Amino acid sequence: MIGVALAGGIAFLGWATTSSSLSGVTFKDVGYSTTDSTLAEVDFQVTREPAKPVKCAVKALDSKFAVVGWKVVDVPPSAADGTPDGGRTVAQRVTLRTESASVSGVVDSCWIPGGES
């Protein structure tokens, strides 16, 4: 009886963890490069349900961590595909105009427009 309850609890915990992570949006910074003192490129990955459009705020920072470039990027929905995660993860590259030389670029946040989860 205890074994059945324990197995049920573990199964529920696994389902709850997986379902909440699949309904939200996560992001991962992948790379950054500076083209010149007025342009920067940021590479990142976004994981979300394939049918959901997402917006991400991306920023470029100077050596004192001040924001010198900022852009909100639209990540359009995509079709589920045969990849291991079913098309949930997509790679993005964004070019930012900067007001001065930047030394890094990162994703500040990502969200589903309209507050959907």
Image (cartoon, helix red, strand yellow):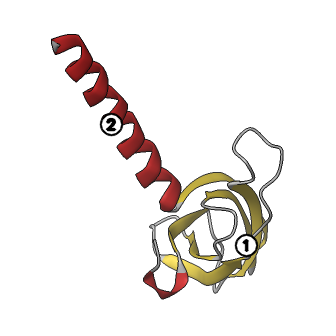
* Screen quadrant of the C terminus: bottom left
Q: Which numbered disc, 1 or 2, marks the residue closer to the eye?
A: 2
In the rendering, which numbered label is found on residue 77? 1
Q: Specify whether 14 is left or right of 32.
A: left
Residue that appears at 74% across and 38% down: 84
Q: Residue 12 carries which label?
A: 2
Q: Residue at x 49, y 87 (%)?
A: 114
Label 2 Cα crowd, 10 Å radius (few <14 / some 14-19 / many 20+): few
Task: Please determine whether, in this image, residue 29 is positioned above or below residue 54.
Answer: above
Q: Which residue lies furthest to the left in this view?
A: 2
Give the vertical position of 69 relative to 12 (above or below). below
- What x and y, as percent, mark residue 25? 52, 62
Provide residue 18's location: percent of width, then percent of height: 46, 44
Instruction: Say whether marks 1 and 2 touch (CB < 8 Å).
Output: no
Q: How crowded is mark 1: few (under 14 residues within 10 Å), some or many (20 or more)?
A: some
Task: Report the side of 5 relative to 64 (left or right).
Answer: left
Q: What residue type is labelled 1?
A: Pro
Q: Which of 70 and 2 is in front in this view?
A: 2
The residue sitting at 60% across, 60% down in the picture is: 48
Which structural element holds mark 2?
Answer: helix
